[in-house]
Each structure stands twice: as C-alpha cells, then as structure tokens.
Amino acid sequence: TVSHPRRPTSSDAIQAYCLTKNGAAICHPSLFARGQALRDLGGYRERFRYTEDLDLYLRLGEVGQLGNLDEVLLDYRVHPGMTSTPYNVEQTLAGIRTIEDACRRRRLKRRRYLAGRLHKASWQFTDLRRPVVGLGYACRAFWADPLRLRNATIVLRSLLRGFVWPKRLDAKP
C-alpha cells in the first residue's frame, strides 16, 4: 500500500509539527536548502545522531522560513530493513535530546513539547523488558502533560507489564 501522509506546508506549522510530533515534518530526501544557510549552521551535528534531520530543520526554522509543497513529488518505500529500524530506541532518545536543545535555544517550556516522545520511549523500553526505564519515561510523560489520559495509562501499563504481569501481554499460552 502506498500512502502519502499530509505534511504541513507553512513554516509555523512545520516548526510546531517538528516540536510536538514523533518525526520531522519535511521528508528528508526531498529537502532543498540554500547551501550557505547549511554551512552557516554547521550542517549536521554529530551529537544528534539518528535525528540529524530534525535538528537541522529546527535550526533552519530559527533563521529562515520552511515550507512543504502541497503536491506529492517523492515516493519511497518504508520497510523493516530501513537504516532507522534497528535504531528505533536510539532515535527516540535522540529526539528527546533534540527537542530539549531546541526548547532551550527558543526559551520554550520543554514539558509541553516532550510528552509525545517520552510516551513513545516508555512504550519502547517496556516492550524491551526494561520496565524500570519504561516506567521512568512514563512518569516523565505524565509529569509533562498530566491531563492527557494516555499518559496516565502508560504509567499503569508500565507497572502492569513490568512488575505485576511480567510476561508479554500478547504472548499465547
């Protein structure tokens, strides 16, 4: 099945998407940017390995305008053998660091922007049978946005999955 997820088109919407969603709002293979702007920013930063593109888009948005075309011009295959697949947890953790860095530069309250990524990290660590780490991220997600029901449920899920009911919930007897 080929899908073309709608991407935001305005600069403000792209910035908001990059800060709050679990992914970048610009499809990396389709990026067009001024070479001088990339050189001025120092290009990719090694400390944000696995989320270099997200970090770059957030920094570009601080010095200029970003945009997406409303028309789909690129098709690419998403599959389990992709380069990012084996590094999914590392990518999530790097995303948390990337958003924290962007919020620090912009003087934004980090809690508001981190809840989704913390939630994802909690699920990943709980599924990897690291319940204490998963619970830690679940509690951070709940603290970041206590009014969201999903953040309360992930704390409960981490407790049940890791401590009360340690076997995989989806495993057949």
Image: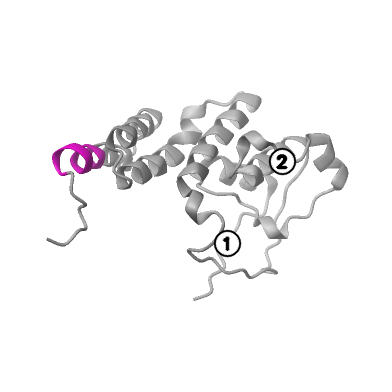
Label at residue 44: 2
| Residue 165 appears left or right of 61 | left
| Residue 12 appears left or right of 119 | right
Which region of the structure is painted magenta?
156-165
Q: Single out the residue that lies furthest toward the bottom.
A: 1
SS label for mark 2: loop
- Residue located at (52% from left, 44% from top): 91
- Residue kind at label 1, given as amino acid type: Arg
| Residue 57 appears left or right of 90 | right
Chief secondary structure of the magenta portion = helix
Q: How is the image coloured?
A: one colour
| Residue 134 appears left or right of 4 | left
Image coordinates of residue 77 in percent, x first then y, are 57, 69
Is residue 12 visible to the viewer in this orientation of the structure? no
Q: Is residue 162 magenta?
A: yes
- Residue located at (14% from left, 39% from top): 164
SS label for mark 1: loop
Rendered image quadrant of residue 65:
top right
Q: Single out the residue that lies furthest toward the right.
A: 36
Q: Which residue, given by chain and number where applicable, does mark 1 sit on? A: 6
**Marks 2 and 1, how far apart at CA:** 26 Å
Rendered image quadrant of residue 157:
top left
Rendered image quadrant of residue 51:
top right
* Image height of 143 relative to 35, above or below: above
- Residue kind at label 2, given as amino acid type: Tyr
For the C terminus, the quadrant is bottom left
- Residue located at (58% from left, 45% from top): 50
Is residue 91 visible to the viewer in this orientation of the structure? yes
Q: Residues within 10 Å of mark 1 (few under 14, many from 20)?
A: few
Image coordinates of residue 40 in percent, x first then y, are 83, 35
Image coordinates of residue 85 in percent, x first then y, are 49, 56
Q: Residues within 10 Å of mark 2 (few under 14, many from 20)?
A: some
